[in-house]
Image (cartoon, helix red, strand yellow):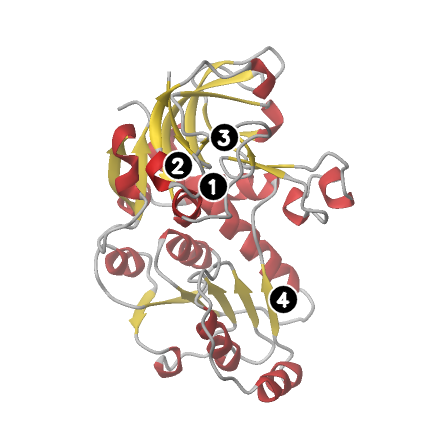
Amino acid sequence: MKAITVVPGRPEQARVDDVGEPSPAEGSVLVEGRLLGLCGTDYEIVEMQGYGWPPPGQERLVIGHESLGSVLEAPEGSGFAPGDLVCGIVRRPDPVPCEPCANGEWDFCRNGRYTERGIKERHGFGSQRWRIEPEFAVRLDLELGDCGVLVEPASVIAKAWEQTERIFARASWRPKVALVTGAGPIGLLAALFGVQRGLEVHVLDVNDVGAKVGLVRDLGATFHVGDVADLGVMPDVVIECTGYGPLVFQLASVVAPNGVLCLTGLSSGTRRVPISVDQLNKEMVLENTVLFGTVNAARRHYEQAAAALARADRDWLARMITKRLPMEAFREGLRKGADDVKVVVDLRA
């Protein structure tokens, strides 16, 4: 069978290989790969030194962590049957395990010894067939179809909203206005989840090119471009999805009193900006502001994500997938075009 393999940090070594069938040691559920979503993490693994780790003793890594597949074989009692639509959970608990990992919260691993499919020391889902343990597979609504490839990124947002709501539980009031920064796949999903919660949602992006404007507006949300200081909006909650460091400090200054600012984006640069940290500290203390970061997801977040997508308009979700590539052309999807939202690889082509 064929698989997309890489030597992390050596882009000239990224290719489609003929590989052996997946080992039963990887899990008792055999899955036919349907689609693989590409994101910035995949770009960093392929293009940048120091990120992405093959399994111990191996040089190459099967890439891919945004998965969608159909079950081919599953043992009795596993909870799965041939034909089930599934996605795979990315992270695995560390072998110690630390207290969070022992309680199914590997997204809060404390010692960093977790592994991740397609990222850290485990082969990913970028192959025509893959195996998975039943406890790390999530069954999806068959009606989701190809939109099921959005479950993994949606799981990150499900966790972000869950943690945000836990913080708001400290007081009697609840948020009414949400701001999402960035209108990529993560930002659009964050906006979807905010609308599903009945919030007034605003989305800020650097430009108004491509499908994202229509996608935001068709949610009933408001699309903005420009500087955050000029929005004229005082959000109760901000979901930051760009990873642009200087923006974080601006957002901390515009969020409403008692507000929550959740960071989901990763900064890849080394930008330096002058800020008045004393003034920022004063504002956050006096206004009960909470700023926190979140990464990865536990099983319950995948289930929350799958449920949220099942409630969403299918046509709207399908419009998020703006480019499909055959396996041999996967490199084209690592650098998104201006009109792209979510790029996927068809593992059957």
Q: Secondary structure at mark 1?
A: helix
The Cα atoms of the two marked residues, 1 and 4, are separated by: 25 Å
Q: Are marks 2 and 1 in contact (CB under 8 Å)?
A: yes
| Residue 42 image-quadrant placement | top left
Q: CA distance from mark 4 to mark 3?
A: 46 Å
- Give the labeled residue for mark 3: 59
Asked whether the viewer can see residue 318, the reply is no
Residue nearest the observer in this picture, 290 or 199: 290
Closer to the chain start, of discs 1 and 4, is 1
Q: Which residue is mark 2?
A: 149
291 over 35 or under it: above or below: below
Which of discs 4 and 3 lies nearer the camera? The answer is: 3
Q: Which badge, 3 or 1, is on the more N-terminal residue?
A: 3
The CA span between labels 3 and 1 is: 26 Å
Q: Would you name the residue on which mark 1 appears? A: 152
What's the residue type where badge 1 is placed?
Glu
Q: Amino acid at mark 3?
A: Glu
For disc 3, the neighbor class at 10 Å (few under 14, some 14 to 19, many from 20) is few
Q: Which residue was labeled with disc 4?
A: 168
Where in the figure is residue 218, as x and y percent of width and height? 28, 56
For the N terminus, give its image quadrant.
Answer: top left
Q: Nearer the viewer, residue 2 or 323?
A: 2
The earlier-in-sequence mark between 4 and 3 is 3
Of the two numbered discs 2 and 4 in the rendering, the one whose residue sits closer to the viewer: 2
Residue 162, by quadrant, is bottom right
**Residue occupying image coordinates x 49% and y 84%:** 274
Neighbor class of circle 4 (other Cα within 10 Å; few <14, some 14-19, many 20+) is some
Label 2 vs 3, first from the N-terminus:
3
